[in-house]
Amino acid sequence: MKAKRILDIVFAGTALVPAVPVLAAACAAIYAYDRRNPVYSATRVGWNGVIFRMYKLRSMVVDADKSSVDTAGNDDPRVTPPGRFLRRWKFDELPQLWNVLRGDMSLVGPRPQIEREVNLYTDVERGLLAVRPGITDFSSIVFSDLAGIAGAHPDPDIAYGQLVRPWKSRLGLFYIAHMSIMLDLALVLLTAVAFVSRQSARRGVALLLSCYNTPPEMIEVCLRRSTLLPTPPPGSTQVVASR
């Protein structure tokens, strides 16, 4: 864990320097659109269930988080024009490098969730809180098109709960069971590959998982060659119907 924390500090500190011009340009574009604060912070559940403030570049209209819908689809009217660009290239996540330096997050780990989502966790899923949440992980690559998945369903939250959350949790738990510096470096590299080709990055994830004792169905989901079907989350026999 100490080596992982050192890697986090060195990488995040180094990455923040070239990220400054990108952050400045993005903030200017967001502010020019609606003259509101371009930085968004929200509470997330972190390591051992501790609540922290996670920072992002604001990609939605102000107070979008006060609506009853948590998952944004491709055509979600709450997403602003500059926000669509930021979300497509994941630039909205750059401020989380500061969360990594603070120790709230790690470069690699299960993505942090809102309290409402964590309250739905099964006992097995609560194992996801055993490590610092991360900026990227297996599921960030496999479900990098989450907005498209959610947007194709009448209820984006149900789509997330039934189609994405079960595998996202399984992948997060798999990461925790096999976490290492080498695995972190591989996932950071595949995250970079995903900017160029999501399909290639998914194939890389599948190849990486095949090096471990990974269930074949998990590898198939990572390749995303077939339609996602409703699946119960780990530790439950019931399909999540709502959030």
Image (tube, rainbow, N blue to C red):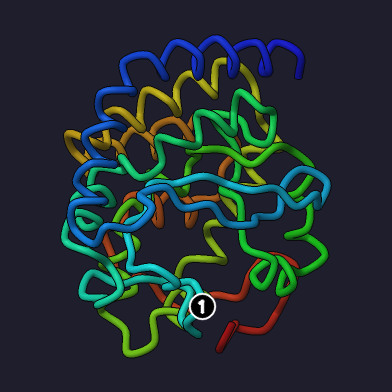
* Quarter of the view holding residue 152: bottom left
Q: Is residue 111 left or right of residue 63?
A: right
**Which type of secondary structure does the marked residue at label 1 adopt?**
helix
Q: Is residue 234 left or right of residue 70?
A: right
Q: Give coordinates of residue 53: x percent, y percent.
A: 64, 48
Q: Residue at x 27, y 37 (%)?
A: 194
* Quarter of the view holding residue 234: bottom right
Q: As rendered, which of 61 and 151 lies closer to the eye?
A: 61
Q: As rendered, which of 197 and 33 lies closer to the eye?
A: 33
Q: Residue at x 51, y 44 (%)?
A: 55
Q: Is residue 209 left or right of residue 49?
A: left
Type of amino acid under label 1: Lys
Above or below, comparing residue 206 to residue 42 in the picture:
above
Q: Give coordinates of residue 6: x percent, y percent.
A: 65, 11
Q: Which residue is mark 1?
A: 66
Q: Give coordinates of residue 26: x percent, y percent.
A: 24, 40
* Quarter of the view holding residue 239: bottom right
Label 1 environment density (alpha carbons within 10 Å; few <14, some 14–19, many ≥20) = few
Q: Residue at x 45, y 22 (%)?
A: 186
Q: Give coordinates of residue 72: x percent, y percent.
A: 36, 71
Q: Residue at x 61, y 23 (%)?
A: 101
Q: Is residue 94 left or right of residue 65?
A: left
Above or below, comparing residue 225 to residue 236 in the picture:
above
Above or below, comparing residue 38 to residue 181 in the picture:
below
Residue farthest front in this picture: 35
Q: How many discs mark residues in the rendered view? A: 1
Q: In which quadrant of the rendered image does the C terminus lie?
A: bottom right
